[in-house]
Image (cartoon, rainbow, N blue to C red):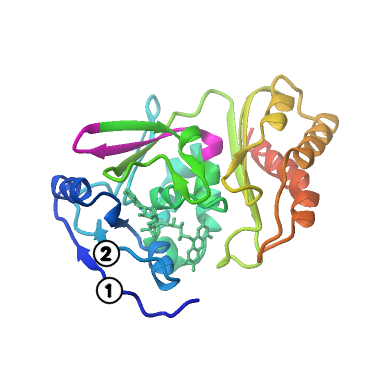
């Protein structure tokens, strides 16, 4: 039940990364990291408790993004959804992320919420997470032991559970440079923008003319974690994209997912529309060829 009254906790506000790593090392899972706070604050109001909360607000750096045609996109842990929207490189080379950002909640939330926080919330409905899953990439974790890079394919290990260790601070998201012929897109179904998705999809495909050479297809809200639709990906790989191949992909998607009923939608509806939304997302991506 939401009480709107937060339980007591010690608020820790380190001013250097080294200080933050010391805190994490000392307190381990007795401290919760808060970045934008748009998930953590809601959780605290709904009864989640921890003795200590560590804010990243005063940590220097980690709040920008950069693009290099060779190295790809680097997104700092404190970079907000609004900053992604303002980036011409994100819009041009990673439209899946840009489209996830443009439909993300409200301006107030976009100004505060971070993409890295979205990944680490581990929600199966995360819009930014869905886009990043399709694009591929890795999350950099830093601890007193050094740096560790976790492939996005291995980040979510269960509902709201990630591969992050209690002493680790996520510092940067890395997304590879788009391959020649890459197209990508994101779409979601939702009641209103302020609400989380009923279903979200992102695709990233390497095209050679009308033939798809490689594909990654990510879907949210149909399992305990975001999923990659491996059967759909296998059907797309090597296929010419036309009505016939897309019809096969649509059937495969419906067969591949086992969604559940929840407050946002029903399993039946999700299954029924899943193929259609994948097809439309592929068509949206293809408009950019
Ligand atoms: C009204 C409202 C609307 C929303 N709409 C959407 C929506 O449309 N789409 C969507 O996907 N989400 C939505 N959300 C959820 C939320 O805004 C996102 O998940 C957001 O991206 C979380 O980012 P944050 O920086 O606020 O994370 P926080 O709440 O600060 O943290 C989220 C999780 O990540 C961990 N964490 C964050 N940063 C680090 C770090 N650097 N190192 C280690 N751990 C870290 C925290 O400990 C926590 O577990 C909405 C939330 C609200 C309140």
7 inside magenta stretch: no
Q: Which mark is residue 157?
A: none
Is the residue 138 above or below the residue 30 in the image? above
SS assignment at label 1: loop
Q: Which region shows up in magenta?
A: 133-146
Where is residue 230? Give x, y as percent.
67, 30
134 inside magenta stretch: yes
Q: Ligand 1 near label 2 (Cβ, under 8 Å)? A: no
Q: Nearer the viewer, residue 170 or 175?
A: 170
Can residue 210 be seen? no
Residue marked by disc 2 = 51
Residue 73: image quadrant is top left
Residue marked by disc 1 = 8
- Which of the image's four quarters has the C terminus? top right
Residue drawn at (44%, 29%), measured in percent from left and top? Answer: 176
Where is residue 57? Give x, y as percent.
24, 59
Q: Nearer the viewer, residue 195 or 282?
A: 195
Label 2 crowd (10 A; few <14 / some 14-19 / many >=20) = some
Residue drawn at (43%, 80%), measured in percent from left and top? Answer: 3
SS assignment at label 2: loop
Label 1 crowd (10 A; few <14 / some 14-19 / many >=20) = few
């Amino acid at each position: 039940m939401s009480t709107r009254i937060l339980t007591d906790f010690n608020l820790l506000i380190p001013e250097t990364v080294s200080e933050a790593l010391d805190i994490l090392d000392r307190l381990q899972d007795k401290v919760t990291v808060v970045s934008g706070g748009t998930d953590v604050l809601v959780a605290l109001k709904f009864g989640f408790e921890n003795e200590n909360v560590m804010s990243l607000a005063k940590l220097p750096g980690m709040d920008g993004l950069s693009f290099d045609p060779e190295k790809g996109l680097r997104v700092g842990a404190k970079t907000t959804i609004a900053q992604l929207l303002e980036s011409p490189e994100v819009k041009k080379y990673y439209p899946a992320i840009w489209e996830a950002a443009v439909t993300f909640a409200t301006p107030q939330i976009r100004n505060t919420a971070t993409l890295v926080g979205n990944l680490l919330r581990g929600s199966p409905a995360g819009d930014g997470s869905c886009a990043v899953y399709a694009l591929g990439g890795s999350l950099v974790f830093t601890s007193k032991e050094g740096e560790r890079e976790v492939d996005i394919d291995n980040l979510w290990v269960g509902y709201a559970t990630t591969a992050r260790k209690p002493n680790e601070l996520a510092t940067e998201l890395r997304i590879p440079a788009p391959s020649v012929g890459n197209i990508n897109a994101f779409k979601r179904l939702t009641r209103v923008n302020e609400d989380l998705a009923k279903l979200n999809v992102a695709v990233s495909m390497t095209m050679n003319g009308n033939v798809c050479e490689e594909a990654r297809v990510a879907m949210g809200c149909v399992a305990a974690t975001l999923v990659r639709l491996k059967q759909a990906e296998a059907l797309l790989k090597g296929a010419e994209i036309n009505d016939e191949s897309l019809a096969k992909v649509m059937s495969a998607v419906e067969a591949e997912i086992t969604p559940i009923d929840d407050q946002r939608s029903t399993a039946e509806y999700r299954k029924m529309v899943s193929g259609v939304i994948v097809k439309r997302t592929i068509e949206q991506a293809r408009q950019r060829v």
